[in-house]
Image (cartoon, coloured by chain):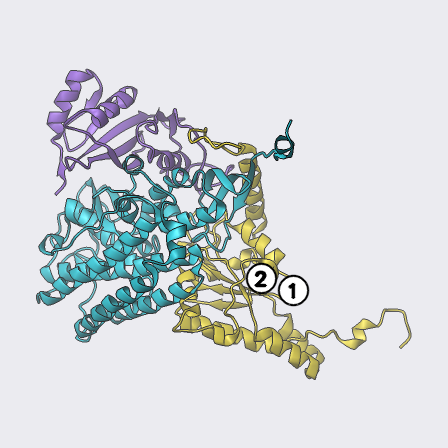
Chain colours: A yellow, B purple, C cyan
Amino acid sequence: MEISSDKEYIYTSSELDRQEGALIEEVKAGAGESVPDPDGWLEEDVKRNIVLTSIDMVLNWARRSSLWPVICFPACCAFEFIAAEGPRFDMSRFGMEILRASPRQADLMITAGTLTWKMAPVVRRIYNQMPEPKWVIAMGACGVSGGIFRSSYAVVPGYNKIIPVDVYVPGCPPRPEALIYAVQLLQKKIAREHPMPDPCELIPKGVKR
Amino acid sequence: MTQVYAVKDLAARLEERFPGSLEESDGDSLVVRAGSLLAVMAYLKDTVGLEFDYLNYITAVDYYSYFEVVYQLTSLTHNHTVVVKTRCQGRNNPSVPSVTGLWGGADFQEREIYDLMGIGFKGHPNLKRIFLWEGFPGHPLRKDFVP
Amino acid sequence: MTTTEMMTLKTEPFVLNFGPVHPSTHGVYRMRATLDGEVILDIEPVVGYLHRGIEKLAEERTFSGFIPLTDRLDYISPMSNNLAYCLAVEKLAGIKIPERGEYLRVIMAELQRLANHCVAVGSFLNDCGAYYTPFMYTFREREKIVDLFDMVCGQRLTYNYMRIGGVSQDIPEEFLPALKKLVKQLARFIEEYERLLKQNEILLARTKGVGILSRETAINCGISGPVARASGVAWDLRKADSYSVYDRFQFDIPVGEAGDSYDRYRVRIEEMRQSLRIIEQAMKDVPGGPVRAELPHLIRPPRGEAYGHLEAPKGELGFYIVSDGSIAPYRCHIRPTSLINLSALREMVKGWKVADLIAIFGSIDITMGEVDR
């Protein structure tokens, strides 16, 4: 096909824009209350009072030592995140050196920037595309609660309106040391999870034990 | 140093060339009527000695009873600058002619003004919202916007 | 029909969506590219994923209270944003700044230019395919510059250092000796960097002649900064419309000829050298005295409007402020350097391939915080 340099501007249809706009309005209308933080791991421990099995410990160690973040860099905090990955505050010593472009290969989302309503369906889609187990660190004041832009007409007041968040890191932007501390807190949380299912729950109901 | 081109001088020349095109010319900017905006802008861009070939920015201000669209033009060869304004009265569907034919950089900026202030630009090749989504209620930068 | 004619493939264009979450687009930038195979026919940029409504928030804050918000515009060079806003308000209110404040402003602005170009060059080479190695080199140098900023104002990224009437606080005694040491190290670093990359075959093949922006298009679209200078437009606000005390220093403006990606890269490297030259001259003559003019806490500029602009690392950054005599701006418009530079992208990428699109986009150096505000 020949390319002519004075070809007319090919505009995509405004129908596509309208559909995307309708999706954003839908997300905005449905984001009234915050998504609750995943704290099931706290209650489990108290309820069952079961010590972690050695398989659990091995799985937890493997998962927390190789957290791969997905690239999702809206705004300024991205630069502190990149600095944390950089030569001085090396995060690859925690296993986090690879930034996966595809969410299907990642298990950690560090939300480094302000979330706007226009971006919200995209973030939700990326979160849904990540396979289990997955964790979210809300980085920066904008991630925690909307930050300095909370009163703006276009800003979502915190990522926990859209996706469940595990660790909140305050700061504007948080220093790379703070981000590394957050990753270590997340690793402590992962160490207490129960990835293996309880054998009692595997037996189907109605069958005599 | 970039000199601000003498507004009175320019106003006199424009009155001579396009009579009735100026609304106001005291102060440090030219206020042009919307109808003759394109003619005046083309004159400023092409005349030898003026040659305002660089558009710094386009913006709009909401003064309750009217909207004012502000353009700043600079000449890179002569190193002088001028501010040109135009007004549109009323708050329902205000519109001014678009200068995208003269300066390509006006494209995105006019879309931004349409999106945030609601001022239409006649002759713009692709006037649709740029920052906010289709279906956003209202125009945020207006003074009477209620979020 | 010959065999060749029978076997020619019939193609038709299709639209491919890039981003907003994409590893190579610097921030949340989305493009709908119309492609014929790998060749680009047209692109339509879709922006607004980081639109935070900063211009509307300006009307709710006081004049001084808006300075932290300006930090978040172009978050790679916040000192320049602060300074542009302060210049606009000082022009409106007719405030004069003490000498020491002016010299400190120049030193900070030029250090910021160095830090910004480190990031720009590093990520441009990342986009060209040299993955993370040059990026790590330039980030190592940027950390040294950011350490100096940390020493001065306590922050690594959003400095909030400039104030209306000067700067917020004086520099500690360790600053100038550390700066002297840094200038020597940076000069050596640029030499080392150039040695590795200037005649590199892959870089030349990927960037020479690629993404050409003609001089007329650059002026017509309002492009400014290194992108315009690489296309032959010898316009730099530090010389053309001198602000602060730049007229006391001697420096050159690097101007390219071809307007391709390689020229944009070379212009940035040369600008880093010229910034070092300015810092060396400024360091020698920093006078004593106050760093900030005596002003009331809540400033009320007189009714009117003003446009204050400066040569930010990415181009001309300006603030158009309208005041009605109260403590908050009536309207504050930010001239978005990156949005205007983006309007040239269409012309630059037509006819090139998808991989070139990424490299050309990287060479313009866009920050979405400034595009969307």
Instruction: Assign a secondary structure to mark 2.
Output: loop
Q: Is residue C178 left or right of residue A187?
A: left
- The residue lying at 52 percent from left, 67 percent from top is A98
**Is residue A45 placed above or below A23 in the rendered structure?**
below
Q: Is residue C313 visible?
A: no
Q: Which residue is mark 1?
A: A132
Residue where numbered disc 2 is placed: A164
Label 1 environment density (alpha carbons within 10 Å; few <14, some 14–19, many ≥20): few
- Please name the amino acid that badge 2 sits on: Pro
Residue occupying the point 58% across, 34% down: C12
- Residue C151 in the image: state x and y as whole percent: 25, 72
The residue tagged with tag 1: helix, strand or loop? loop
- Label 2 CA crowd tier, 10 Å (few <14, some 14–19, many 20+): some
Res B144 quadrant in image = top left
- Which amino acid, mark 1? Glu
Quick check: B4 left or right of B120? left
In percent of width and height, residue B108 lies at 38, 37
